[in-house]
């Protein structure tokens, strides 16, 4: 492993080059999945969904629907009996025998128009026997709760997930380190708190859409708005009994992902239906309303925390019990529970830790990956108890954090050694920028101001060995085409990949193209576009592929010029010799090679560089204690500080200043990093103030933009500052780590702490809506 | 809010009548399965939700006079039914003489929705949350209606009966809303409490219009209308009386705000609980009346 | 089901289209004219991704019937650039970093264009108000507001 610190950093690294996809996107030329034209044969799929949170399917009569002119296929769970799932295989493409949430697919229809497909749904009769529903995770984990997955013990599961058959607990992650009970006795102050974080939805502006077609030979193509073309190829093919090589996934630009287009959700539906109508492309798109509750959502969390410190403010112990409301399937959610478990201390150095992180089946929508992968929910609790504990012992919060945060070399709660991290620097920088300790006067007599700070950490949550690969090819004019399997979902992955390839090769940025759209038939393998892992993992693969190509070019030229490779370099698209001072453009030679002198033949041939990366050092953790050598690949850390103004007459919160600082190791493209920090913060703010899936008896009450509000242009702070801190990652490309998810992680706690500073009240969890803040102030006697 | 709306609009026929008479006759003949079509901003949402199942959408926007906005210094402002909210907000007459109406219109949803949404449509739709209803009532608005029995005027003060329920009958087409000249030196204020800062439906809306009035003990008349706290736009008459009968002081305003709160009968829904809404009526009536009072005193 | 044949001008081109009564302007633009720059994000007038200029005014095209467009002039995102020359707004969005996933971008550009047509030098608050009906989940809006401001400057420079 090359130590990043000792490597020369090329000029292009750390440069804010413009996005390479932006011109397409401002002209309307950029193609998204729903924009692809399929011609007159296109069929449209619609789905009849469960009207009950929990019920047995007694009978399904599709005969009338099948008879409707224009209907080409009607399918049910019986047609596709195999289970699917990223980690825990506990889901069916269409419900089989039992429905477990309102909105679960029961019958699929393909017809010549969406209208006819909708009419067909009305003609389908499904008879149910309604069962008691579990709509609370804490209750769901008790022995009294009805069992939602009686066959949990039979499900296929990887060895780092620990289901408890006979219960609704599909994963139980534990940490037992030191002796918390004894340590609490030593504490000068102890804070206990329960926080509830409601389900929220990703709300990409582009709803899910997928189109599938099977040809007469049985080969299937899926076009999808997808963060995970390879995972979808793998899982859908396996479930439907197709060879992975006979399934092809084409994934154009994604109109916002945030995790909801990772793994497999609705994409399996058109594929399944397409296998019944060979030759026909079948399109399935979710309505905005379906987008809200029928696909992945962010799990709800009830977190019970107990944390204590000594009189000097040194943290001594933490107990953390998390009940994750995993929903009807926890195929993906089990690993969120695990991530919440191994990161359960937050970025704090605590000697005694007891953690129980439970993934609980409920009859709620299915939890999946969501920007932060459990960390926003976890830190909503951690960030507040730390604030309260500092209050308890009367210590300045910034001082308290600086005293207790993890440092490079610390042994973490899982036994892993922490790598160098710039968290302390992040804290200092946000404190400075927000003018910590200085109280500014409110803008009106009926308003109160306050400041809050909160920290975060997050590791990429993945299996131990997710792989990345890349290739680098050339066109005749020397321009470069880079093949990647990681997706451009708005974060700028293609731009950064191009930048890295250009930097590693020694060509100008505008020589590089990314081979798109992603196509599993031609693009190199990438596990998934999740976990803020692309810059780091795919980045390594791209860098290696470019270096491989570069080496091939230099070898060829060295041979042609009869020089030593070490004297050659590629600069601005030309091979130069520092010895002979000759130079030659990459143009032509990267395809045709170089002629030998006197027409005596040729040297070289088409250059193709390849690179791969896979972490090989992540170890398992003990099932009972959570201890192991290395739980994760690394942690990205950061801090946020906010200043808020609370309206005493309405409870409305106005964020007037927001500062973020994160340590992403190396900012390959600083502008893109700032954009992630801005956008992530606003998404965090939106979840902190506005967002909640209102679930009543399993039914979502607000599945529309009218009733589920997200932040708009008028809700953002007038002042926002984002700060880059760089403590290089030993195995990151030029030291880089990801920072896509992190900016929204500390926001709920930062806001809660600022509101507390302003008006002295805390809620039992987000959203900090005007109503909830006002009612809390009323209850506390702050207002009358 | 429906869990399973259709992806697109359900099928219907589009009717574009040549005259009000033809439109009215068609609507009367197809009572229950046809409706007049203005901006469509509510209609389409309800059709997707399968709440409305009309077979015919009767586009009356292009009939004579529907797109006119006229001002007469003696009689006041007349806004055709197809005049959109942005046009009202941009009208120099509205801005000069009816700033309260402009303020209310500008608070509705988003600019691009207001390119379609109309004041008359807002009135006919009769949502308790309708932002422009309070101002329209307090400004003495009268709806011009063309029906099977000819033309008639509907004073808005007696027009609303419940969510979506009004004096309109099958065959009726609202053609315009008319506002007389506002009382001399009148000052208005619309305070809308949203979840977001802007672009949202009202949790509570408070409309206040105040003006000097020698007939009252206080020397002033305050009119107060409340949105989203009753099945219809609620006129807070008890609060109005308090402000008419006692000298305007902080205590009087507080008492009036309390009376408005006591009069409101909100429901709990996804936007807010009944309890919070009542408290906000109190706090925002106080704020709005105080604002208006401040301006009345110059 | 009756169909209607309508004639309209889209991005300067005359189009004759036959549509069913319940087809929205959005569906017509995307499916009949294959102008897929205009996006469908909610089909209920809330997200603004389908915003187009309709006789010069911004509308959510999912809230307009295609038949209503008979005789109308429509401008979509594809109609903003001329002769391969980006509109100052597009240029400014590029320079400001106003684009991430790009799905809200066409609607943002059209709403911004409409704003600049009616208020050539808008204040920050005017920009924010004008874009309140265009949801974006990626950018946090900061650079979009910056982009509109920058467009004013670019337009002013090109006039000089």
Image: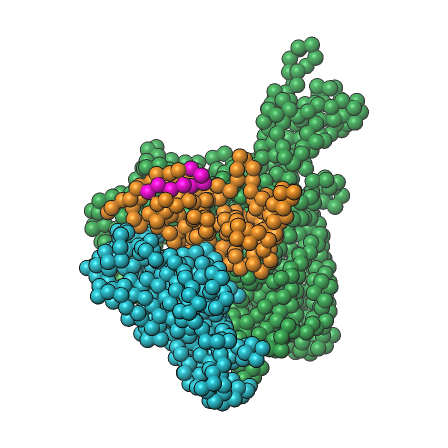
User: Residue at coordinates 20% horizontally, 47% vertically from top-left?
Assistant: A67
Q: Is residue A719 above or below residue A590?
A: below
User: Residue at coordinates 67% horizontally, 58% vertically from top-left?
Assistant: A721
User: Residue at coordinates 47% horizontally, 83% vertically from top-left?
Assistant: B213
**Residue A181 coordinates in the image, percent (x, y):** 62, 75
- Residue A760: quarter of image: bottom right
Judged left or right of residue A684, residue A145 is left
Judged left or right of residue A159, residue B14 is left
- Residue A233: quarter of image: top left
Asked whether the viewer can see residue A391, the reply is: yes
Give the mark count: 0
- Residue A354: quarter of image: bottom right
Question: What is the chief secondary structure element of the magenta stretch?
Answer: strand
Q: Is residue A354 above or below residue A80?
A: below
**Residue B249 coordinates in the image, percent (x, y):** 55, 87
Q: What colour is chain B? A: cyan
Out of A578 and A168, give the one closest to the viewer: A578
Out of B294 and B219, give the one closest to the viewer: B219
> Where the N terminus of chain A falls, by quadrant?
top right
Q: Is residue A424 above or below residue C17?
A: below
Read off the magenta span: C6-13
Judged left or right of residue A643, residue B283 is left
Asked whether the viewer can see residue A698, the reply is: no
User: Residue at coordinates 61% horizontally, 49% vertically from top-left?
Assistant: C152
Out of A135 and B160, give the one closest to the viewer: B160
Colour scheme: by chain
**Residue A261 coordinates in the image, percent (x, y):** 47, 50
What is the letter of the orange chain?
A: C
**Residue C92 coordinates in the image, percent (x, y):** 60, 46
Q: What colour is chain A? A: green
Out of A712 and B1, give the one closest to the viewer: A712
> Where the C terminus of chain A falls, by quadrant?
bottom right
């Amino acid at each position: 492993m090359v130590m990043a610190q000792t490597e020369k950093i090329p000029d292009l690294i750390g440069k804010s080059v413009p996005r390479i996809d932006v011109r397409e996107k401002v002209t309307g030329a950029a193609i998204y999945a729903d924009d692809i034209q399929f011609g007159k044969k296109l069929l449209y799929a619609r789905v009849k969904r469960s009207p009950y949170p929990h019920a047995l399917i007694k009978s399904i009569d599709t005969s009338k629907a099948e008879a409707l002119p224009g209907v080409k296929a009607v399918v049910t769970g019986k047609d596709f009996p195999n289970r699917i799932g990223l980690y825990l295989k506990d889901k069916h493409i269409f419900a089989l025998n039992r429905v477990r949430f309102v909105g679960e697919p029961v019958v699929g229809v393909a017809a010549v128009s969406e209208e006819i497909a909708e009419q067909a749904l009305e003609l389908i009769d499904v008879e149910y026997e309604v069962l008691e529903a579990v709509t609370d995770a804490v209750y769901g984990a008790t022995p009294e709760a009805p069992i939602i997955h009686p066959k949990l013990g039979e499900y296929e599961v990887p060895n780092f997930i620990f289901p408890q058959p006979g219960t609704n607990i599909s994963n139980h992650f534990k940490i037992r380190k030191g002796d918390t009970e004894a340590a609490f006795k030593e504490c000068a102050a102890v804070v206990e708190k329960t926080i509830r974080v409601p389900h929220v939805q990703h709300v990409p502006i582009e709803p899910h859409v997928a189109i599938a077609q099977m040809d007469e030979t049985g080969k299937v193509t899926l076009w999808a708005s997808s963060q995970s073309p390879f995972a979808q190829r793998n899982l859908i093919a396996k479930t439907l009994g197709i060879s992975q090589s006979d399934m092809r996934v084409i994934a154009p630009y994604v109109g916002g992902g945030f995790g909801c287009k990772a793994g497999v959700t609705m994409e399996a539906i058109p594929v399944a239906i397409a296998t019944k109508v060979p030759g026909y492309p079948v399109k399935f798109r979710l309505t905005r309303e379906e987008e809200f509750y029928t696909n992945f959502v962010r799990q709800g969390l009830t977190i019970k925390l107990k944390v204590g410190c000594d009189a000097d403010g040194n943290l001594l112990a933490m107990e953390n019990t998390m009940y994750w409301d995993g929903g009807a399937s926890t195929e993906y959610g089990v690993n969120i529970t695990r991530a919440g478990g191994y990161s359960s201390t937050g970025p704090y150095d605590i000697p005694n830790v007891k953690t129980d992180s439970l993934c609980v089946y409920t009859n709620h929508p299915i939890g999946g990956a969501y920007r932060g992968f459990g960390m926003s929910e976890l830190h909503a609790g951690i960030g507040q108890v730390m604030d309260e504990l500092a209050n308890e012992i009367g210590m300045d919060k910034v001082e308290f954090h600086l005293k207790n945060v993890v440092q490079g070399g610390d042994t973490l709660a899982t036994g892993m050694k922490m790598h160098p991290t710039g968290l302390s620097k992040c804290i200092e920088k946000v404190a400075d920028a927000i003018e910590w300790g200085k109280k500014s006067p409110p803008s009106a007599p009926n308003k109160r101001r306050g400041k809050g700070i909160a920290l975060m950490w997050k590791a990429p949550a993945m299996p131990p060995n997710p792989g990345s690969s890349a290739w680098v090819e050339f066109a005749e004019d020397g321009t470069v085409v880079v093949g990647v399997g990681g997706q451009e979902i708005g974060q700028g992955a293609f731009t950064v990949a191009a930048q890295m390839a250009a930097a590693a090769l020694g060509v100008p940025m505008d020589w590089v193209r990314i081979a798109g759209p992603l196509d599993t038939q031609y693009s190199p393998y990438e596990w998934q576009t999740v976990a803020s892992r692309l810059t780091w993992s795919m980045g390594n693969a791209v860098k290696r592929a470019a270096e491989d190509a570069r080496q091939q070019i230099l070898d060829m030229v060295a041979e042609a010029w009869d020089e030593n490779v070490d004297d050659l370099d590629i600069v601005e698209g030309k091979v130069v010799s520092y010895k002979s001072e000759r130079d030659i453009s990459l143009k032509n030679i990267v395809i045709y090679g170089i002629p030998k002198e006197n027409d005596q033949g040729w040297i070289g041939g088409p250059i193709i560089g390849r690179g791969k990366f896979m972490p090989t050092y992540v170890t398992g953790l003990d099932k009972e204690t959570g201890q192991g050598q290395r739980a994760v690949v690394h942690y990205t850390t950061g801090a946020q500080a906010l200043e808020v103004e609370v309206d005493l007459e309405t409870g409305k919160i106005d964020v007037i200043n927001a500062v973020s600082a994160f340590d992403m190791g190396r900012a390959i493209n600083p502008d893109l990093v700032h954009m992630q920090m801005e956008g992530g913060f606003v998404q965090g703010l939106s979840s902190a103030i506005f967002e909640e899936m209102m679930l009543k008896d399993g039914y979502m009450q607000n599945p529309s933009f009218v009733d589920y509000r997200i932040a708009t242009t008028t809700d953002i702070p007038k002042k926002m500052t984002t700060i880059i801190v760089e403590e290089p990652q030993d195995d990151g490309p030029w030291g880089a780590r990801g920072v896509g998810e992190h900016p929204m992680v500390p926001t709920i706690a930062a806001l809660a702490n600022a509101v507390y500073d302003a008006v002295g009240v805390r809620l039992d969890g987000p959203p900090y809506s005007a109503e909830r803040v006002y009612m809390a102030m009323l209850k506390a006697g702050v207002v009358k | 809010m429906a869990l399973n709306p259709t992806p697109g609009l359900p099928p219907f026929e589009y009717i574009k009548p040549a005259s009000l008479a033809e439109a009215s006759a068609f609507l009367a003949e197809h009572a229950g399965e046809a409706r007049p079509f203005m901006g469509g901003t509510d209609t389409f949402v309800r059709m997707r939700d399968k709440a409305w199942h009309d077979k015919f959408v009767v586009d009356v926007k292009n009939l004579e006079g529907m797109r006119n906005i006229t001002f007469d210094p003696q009689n006041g402002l007349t806004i055709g039914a197809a005049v959109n909210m942005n046009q009202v907000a941009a009208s120099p007459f509205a801005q000069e003489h009816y700033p309260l109406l402009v303020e209310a219109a500008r608070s509705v949803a988003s600019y691009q929705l207001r390119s379609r949404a109309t004041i008359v449509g807002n009135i006919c739709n009769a949502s308790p949350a309708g932002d422009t209803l309070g101002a329209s009532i307090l400004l003495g608005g009268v709806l011009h209606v063309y029906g099977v029995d000819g033309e008639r005027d509907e004073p808005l003060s007696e027009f609303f009966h419940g969510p979506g329920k009004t004096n309109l009958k099958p065959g009726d087409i609202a053609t315009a809303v008319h506002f007389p000249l506002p009382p001399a030196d009148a000052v208005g204020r619309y305070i809308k409490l949203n979840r977001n800062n802007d672009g949202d439906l009202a949790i509570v809306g408070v409309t206040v219009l105040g003006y000097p009035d020698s007939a009252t003990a206080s020397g002033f008349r305050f009119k107060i209308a409340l949105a989203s706290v009753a099945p219809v736009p609620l006129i807070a008459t008890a609060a109005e009386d308090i402000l008419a009968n006692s000298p305007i002081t902080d205590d009087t305003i507080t008492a009036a705000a309390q009376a408005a709160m006591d009069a409101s009968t909100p429901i709990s829904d996804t936007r807010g609980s009944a309890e919070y809404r009542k408290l906000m009526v109190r706090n925002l009536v106080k704020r709005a009346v105080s604002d208006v009072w401040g301006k009345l005193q110059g | 089901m009756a169909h209607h044949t309508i004639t309209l001008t889209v991005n300067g081109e005359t189009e004759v289209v036959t549509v069913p009564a319940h087809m929205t302007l959005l569906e017509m633009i995307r499916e009949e004219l294959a102008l897929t720059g205009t996006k469908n994000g909610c089909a209920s007038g809330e997200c603004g991704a389908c915003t187009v200029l309709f006789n010069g005014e911004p509308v959510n095209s999912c809230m307009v019937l295609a038949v209503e467009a008979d005789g109308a002039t429509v401008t979509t995102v594809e109609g903003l650039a001329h002769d391969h020359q980006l509109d100052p707004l597009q240029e400014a969005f590029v320079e400001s970093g106003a684009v991430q996933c790009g799905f809200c971008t066409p609607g943002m550009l059209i709403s911004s264009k409409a704003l600049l047509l009616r208020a050539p030098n808008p204040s920050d608050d005017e920009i924010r108000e004008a874009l309140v009906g265009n949801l974006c989940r990626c950018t946090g809006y900061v650079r979009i507001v910056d982009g509109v401001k920058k467009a004013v400057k670019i337009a002013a420079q090109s006039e000089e």
